[in-house]
Image (spheres, coloured by chain):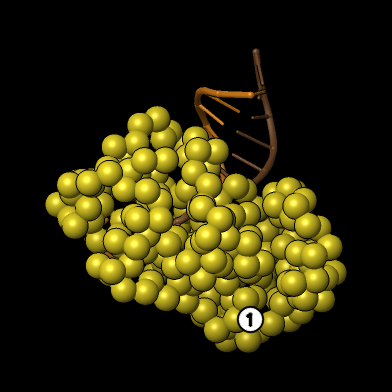
Chain colours: A yellow, B brown, C orange
Amino acid sequence: MQLTITQLYQKMRRQMGPSGWWPADSKEEIVIGAILIQNTNWRNADRALNLLRQATGLQPDRILALTMDQLHDLVRPAGFYRNKSKALVSVLSWLARGNYDYPAIRQHYGSRLRQELRALHGVGPETADVLLTYIFDVPTFISDKYARTLFTYLGVTGLTDYQSLSQRCNLPDDFTPAMAKDFHGLIDEFGKVYFHPRDKFATSFLSDDTLAL
DNA sequence: GGCCAGGACACCA
DNA sequence: TGGTGTCATGGC
């Protein structure tokens, strides 16, 4: 069957249930996790997250009070620890300037919020969209590797990099923040189950479907 | 022992 | 404006 974005979301939601994404106890934990997870498996990112939790309770001001050597040691298990430490400092100190008042920050920057996020060190196109969706409640389609693989699986061609899909896929206006969060979670959970390195296109409940963008 | 994981950036032409 | 190299760890 030929599906729209909304129909695809509904079908995945029916088959898989709520994704529960992003699993975290606070928005600050999501911000930190979004940086630690970059190009890294969750096991390693979670190790670093737990080291940071033990050391600081994941309180941004306590993280910003660490020396760079201390931060490096905590972030190390996640890999790219120099880059990620620098990214944590740049993003958390920017949020600190807004007193971690996310609605107020969103209000202040308005439609320029994404470009402000992109200007922070360590925030590329994907992390910016993750922060928009999960921190600022701006429903955004996150065209990460799993999304591109899924959409290719559904017959969409030419999805070579992040922006190739990002430019073509906007969420319908009726997508709420909760739906956007859930949709991304479902896409990534689907990818983990059905897209293995050796068998990228396993049989699934979407095998007979195509997608219309 | 190579490949990969919920990317981003510096450098270069 | 794009293409390529680098950043790092741990599991399989």
Q: Tell me: residue A64, above or below residue A147.
A: below
Which residue occupies the foreground of this view, A49 or A206?
A206
Which residue appears farthest toward the left when viewing the image?
A: A203
The residue shown at (53%, 47%) is: A170
Specify few, some or many for label 1: CA neighbours under 10 Å numbering under 14, 14-19, or 20 or more: some
Residue A90 image offset from top left, x and y in percent: 75, 60
The residue shown at (44%, 67%) is: A182
Which residue occupies the foreground of this view, C6 or A161?
A161
In this orientation, does residue A35 appear?
A: no
Residue placed under numbered mark 1 in the picture:
A58
Which image quadrant for residue A189? Answer: bottom left
Q: Tell me: residue A62, above or below residue A135.
A: below
Q: Chain of mark 1?
A: A
The residue shown at (64%, 76%) is: A28
How many callouts does the rendering have? 1
The residue shown at (35%, 56%) is: A7
Which image quadrant for residue A29? Answer: bottom right
In this orientation, does residue A145 appear?
A: yes
Please indicate whether residue A153 sits to the left or right of residue A177 in the image.
Answer: left
Report the quarter where the C terminus of chain A lies: top left
Residue A18 image offset from top left, x and y in percent: 37, 74
Q: Amino acid at mark 1?
A: Leu
Residue A112 image offset from top left, x and y in percent: 77, 51
Please indicate whether residue A112 sits to the left or right of residue A177 in the image.
Answer: right
Which residue occupies the foreground of this view, A175 or A194?
A175
Q: Tell me: residue A136, above or below residue A63.
A: above
Describe the element under mark 1 as helix, strand or loop.
Answer: loop
Residue B9 image offset from top left, x and y in percent: 67, 43
